[in-house]
């Protein structure tokens, strides 16, 4: 199954969804109504109060993968070769989780590039629980901090809900670059992509929805994490 998540007042579906649905019969776009039942009941109002769609998406993709299994792709990621994608996902026959990185950018000895915009996992993969629990904890800690003041409370989605959660959970920070922990070596496959198309998908192929100053890295500088 191809999974996408979308929550937006400006468009009904992710820009890349039609291309995926033309190429793959089992491509489903999920929304908040699909995610809420997968959350701990007490956390549902917390989830609904999150201001930035990117933060909701970081959590939603993990919950949806745990529930359904398959390939999650961000709204801007487009399909390329089905045969290539099949080859890429073959790693799920021996691993519970596939992480992806832009390997073609890692030209230096210390370069390291990992992302959470594309993830693949078996249904019920226990590794997803580790990520979900960490993100829930981080969000609740931010809630506690924001409830203590009306000022802007600094945060960084990359570390709080995003890619760095993968790194913190599964990698040892050793030179020259982070290394997958031995405990996960036979459970997690790290696919460092040779280029932007050969893995069966293309990053940033559909970025029409991005507005000036609308990226999470820009919004987090002056917007509180939670709605008032």
Image (cartoon, rainbow, N blue to C red):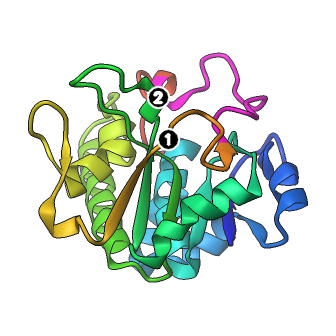
Q: State the residue in front, 64 or 213.
A: 64
- Residue 166 visible in the snapshot: yes
Q: Quadrant of residue 22?
A: bottom right
Residue 63 is a magenta residue: no
Residue 23: % across, % down: 85, 59
| Residue at numbered disc 1 | 193
Please check the rendered image and state whether residue 216 is part of the magenta-colored stretch, yes or no.
yes
Vertical arrangement, residue 222 with respect to residue 52, above or below: above
The main secondary structure of the magenta stretch is: loop
157 displayed left or right of 172:
right
Helix or strand or loop: what does disc 1 sit on?
Answer: loop
195 relative to 12 in the view: left or right: left
Q: Residues within 10 Å of mark 2 (few under 14, many from 20)?
A: few
Question: Image point 50% across, 57% down: which residue?
Answer: 119
Does the image show residue 223? no
Separation (CA) of disc 2 from disc 1: 7 Å
Q: Position of residue 92 (x, y in %)?
A: 48, 72
Which residue is denoted by mark 2 in the rendering? 104
* Label 2: which secondary element: helix
Say which quarter of the image contains residue 89: bottom right
Give the residues in magenta: 202-217
Q: Are marks 2 and 1 in contact (CB under 8 Å)?
A: yes
Q: Residue at x 21, y 25 (%)?
A: 110
């Amino acid at each position: 199954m191809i999974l996408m998540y979308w929550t937006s007042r400006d468009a009904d579906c992710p820009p890349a969804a039609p291309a995926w649905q033309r190429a793959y019969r089992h491509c489903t776009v999920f929304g908040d109504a699909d995610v809420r039942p997968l959350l701990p009941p007490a956390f549902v109002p917390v989830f609904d109060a999150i201001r930035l769609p990117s933060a909701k998406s970081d959590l939603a993709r993990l919950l949806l993968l745990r529930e359904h299994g398959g390939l999650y792709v961000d709204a801007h990621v487009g399909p390329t070769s089905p045969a290539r994608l099949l080859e890429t996902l073959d790693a799920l026959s021996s691993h519970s989780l596939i992480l992806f990185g832009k390997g073609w950018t890692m030209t230096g000895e210390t370069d390291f590039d990992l992302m959470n915009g594309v993830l693949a996992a078996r249904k019920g993969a226990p590794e997803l629980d580790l990520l979900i629990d960490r993100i829930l904890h981080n969000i609740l800690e931010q809630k506690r901090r924001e409830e203590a003041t009306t000022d802007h409370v600094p945060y960084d989605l990359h570390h709080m809900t995003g890619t760095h959660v993968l790194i913190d959970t599964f990698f040892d920070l050793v030179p020259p670059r982070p290394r997958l922990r031995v405990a996960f070596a036979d459970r997690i496959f790290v696919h460092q992509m040779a280029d932007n198309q050969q893995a069966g998908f293309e990053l940033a192929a559909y970025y029409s929805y991005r507005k000036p100053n609308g990226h999470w890295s820009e919004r987090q500088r002056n917007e509180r994490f939670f709605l008032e």
